[in-house]
Amino acid sequence: MTECELLSKCGFFNKYQDSKQAACSGFVAMYCKGPKMDSCKRKAYRKENGVAPPDDMMPTGSMVVS
């Protein structure tokens, strides 16, 4: 698999995929379309809680600080 199966409904990806912030584009490359896909805390949150996490929750579990 070359990208996460949840991309179409992932609030973080949809909000930050075109971000010029290096951190966000790095997370997209590593977690959304890369080797850390199965380590995504957003995916774990959705599985545990049955709902999507906040859009500003990064794949590491931290929140985006603007």
Image: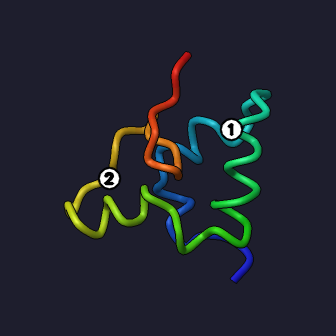
- Pick the front one: 14 or 26: 26
Q: Amino acid at mark 2?
A: Ala
Residue 50 is marked as: none
Q: Is 54 on the left or on the right of 14, as rendered?
A: left
Residue for point 35% across, 39% down? 54
- Residue located beneath label 2 in the image: 52
The image position of residue 50, as x and y in percent, is 21, 64
**Left or right: 56 with respect to 23?**
left
Q: What's the residue at 32%, 59% (across, down)?
A: 45
What residue would you read off at disc 1? 24
Q: Position of residue 17 (x, y in %)?
A: 69, 42
Residue 36 place in picture, x, y as percent: 64, 68
Horizontal side of residue 36 vs 39, given as left or right: right
Amino acid, disc 1: Cys
Element assignment for label 1: helix
Compared to residue 40, the image places residue 57 above or below, namely above
